[in-house]
Amino acid sequence: MSSSGPASSGEVPTVLVKDRDGHDLLCFLEQLIPLDDTDYALLTPVDTPVCLFRLRDRDDPELIESITSSEPILSVADVVLQEHDLTLVRSAVTLTVNGELDEPDPEELDEEDVDDESETYELLVSFLVDEQEYGLYIPLDPFFVVARMDDGAALLVEGEEFDRVQPRIEAELDEQGLPE
């Protein structure tokens, strides 16, 4: 995966999404979906999204769903990623990695992959913090972000609003024959 953008000659517009805590995430604008006089944007991150797992043992990794940007684990991850010319970005919605990454080959995925609720991940790096092993994994399924467009600004759709609009956005995409 590369953070250099789409390979086609047509430029895909980018949008800076903000969450309610003021964190932002630069995304490609994939689709605008009008619902109830509001434009919702379906976006994909420009940088590569990653998920942090606690590796108690390789057969049962535990996804860490919530982590503060000042967490010491992330400082160690920063150092490990720098050794690979990559940068960990603490952004809205998800952690991302900036830098050149190789495209994963689905046929070469091995037992280090994590299967969590039918999602597949590829191990990017693993590291130790206080004798506990952690891993940063790249989700292999497409990672979409939903934002509400408001006067040219993209605001992350979260919580109740997300629960309310997500089924309608999926129905709209199904109707248009686009991936969810």
Image (cartoon, rainbow, N blue to C red):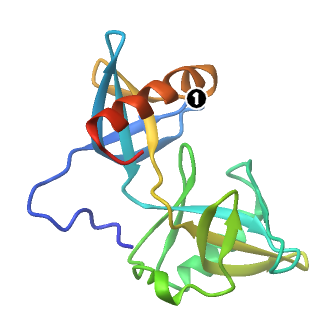
Query: Residue 147: in sight, yes or no?
Result: no
Amino acid, disc 1: Glu
Question: What residue do we see at 77% from left, 63% from top?
Answer: 72
Q: Which residue is mark 1?
A: 158
Q: Is residue 38 left or right of residue 64?
A: left
Of 20 and 139, the residue lying toward us? 139
User: How many labels, in total?
Assistant: 1
- Place of residue 69 in the rendered image (x, y in percent of width and height, measured from the top left): 67, 51
On screen, residue 171 versus residue 64, left or right, reads: left
The percent position of residue 179, horizontal first and vertical second, equals 37, 48
Residue extending furthest toward the top: 37
Residue 98 higher or lower than 84, as above or below:
above
Q: Position of residue 85 (x, y in %)?
A: 46, 81
Dot 1 lies on which element? loop
Report which quarter residue 54 is drawn in. bottom right
Q: Is residue 60 above or below residue 44?
A: below
Asked whether residue 21 appears in the rendered view, the answer is yes
Q: Identify the image quadrant of residue 9.
A: bottom left
Residue at image position (68%, 83%) is: 112
x then y, percent, for residue 115: 68, 68
Q: Is residue 145 left or right of residue 61?
A: left
130 is higher (above) or lower (below) than 27: below
Residue furthest to the left in view is: 9
Work out which quarter of the rendered image holds the N terminus and state it.
bottom left
The residue located at (50%, 69%) in the rendering is 87
Instruction: Check the picture and name the quadrant holding the C terminus.
Output: top left
Q: 102 or 141, which lies in front?
A: 141
